[in-house]
Image: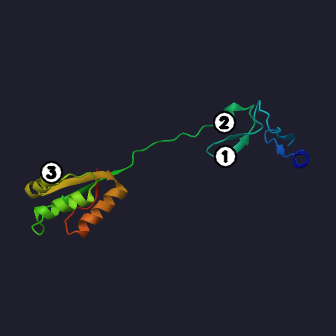
């Protein structure tokens, strides 16, 4: 009994779709549940002027949006030589804040910082570079300003 009421209500409230491709604005019924569509009534296309409704009979009016992928900018975190902090402090900071930094790598970087005056300790996306730059600076390390890689 309840199923019959639902079917009757669905038949009475069958929605109509305006065919935007037709200049007269004629209406067509949506297909009933369980049926398959043979052709779409409305095709949405993107154009430089924005989305528009065009009929499926004019494929030349349909334009595809092209996505241009640009690499995410990478930035370098550079630690500068300073007589204030010790090798051990530099190593501890690098191991604690730079992901996947091994103590042996941190010792090599600490010697490079001491010998060459600076070393790139991390390079990657800008947001992460800013975080590591801030964390290392908060620990007292002297850092060069962030610069693109």
Q: Which residue is mark 3?
A: 104
Query: Relative to residue 2, is residue 30 depicted above or below?
Result: above
Residue visible at 32% across and 62% down in the picture: 131
The image quarter in which residue 127 lies: bottom left
Instruction: Name the foreground residue: 86 vs 2.
Output: 2
Query: Relative to residue 64, is residue 97 depicted above or below?
Result: below
Task: Classify residue 73 as left or right of residue 40.
Answer: left
Dot 3 or dot 1: first in sequence order is 1
Residue 19 screen position, x and y as percent = 81, 41
| Callout 2: SS | loop
The image quarter in which residue 94 lies: bottom left
Q: Which residue is mark 1?
A: 51
Instruction: Name the foreground residue: 69 vs 130.
Output: 130
- Badges 3 and 2: C-beta atoms under 8 Å apart? no
| Residue 30 marker | none
Q: Which residue is mark 2?
A: 62
Residue visible at 63% across and 37% down in the picture: 63
Dot 2 or dot 1: first in sequence order is 1
Q: CA distance from mark 2 to mark 1?
A: 10 Å
Instruction: Name the foreground residue: 7 vs 108.
Output: 7
| Callout 1: SS | loop
- Mark 1 nearby-residue class (10 Å; few <14, some 14–19, many ≥20): few
- Mark 2 nearby-residue class (10 Å; few <14, some 14–19, many ≥20): some
Residue visible at 45% across and 42% down in the picture: 69
| Callout 3: SS | helix
- Badges 2 and 1: C-beta atoms under 8 Å apart? no
């Amino acid at each position: 009994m309840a199923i019959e009421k639902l079917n009757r209500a669905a038949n009475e409230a069958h929605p109509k779709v305006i065919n935007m491709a037709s200049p007269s604005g004629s209406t067509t019924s949506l297909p009933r549940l369980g049926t398959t569509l043979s052709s779409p009534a409305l095709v949405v296309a993107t154009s430089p002027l924005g989305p528009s409704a065009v009929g499926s009979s004019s494929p030349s009016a349909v334009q595809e949006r092209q996505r241009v992928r640009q690499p995410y900018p990478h930035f370098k975190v550079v630690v500068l030589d300073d007589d204030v902090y010790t090798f051990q402090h530099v190593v501890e900071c690098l191991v604690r804040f730079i992901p996947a930094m091994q103590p042996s790598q941190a010792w090599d970087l600490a010697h490079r910082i001491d010998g060459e005056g600076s070393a790139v300790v991390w390079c990657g996306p800008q947001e992460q570079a800013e975080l590591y730059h801030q964390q290392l600076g908060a620990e007292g390390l002297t850092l060069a300003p962030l610069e693109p890689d």
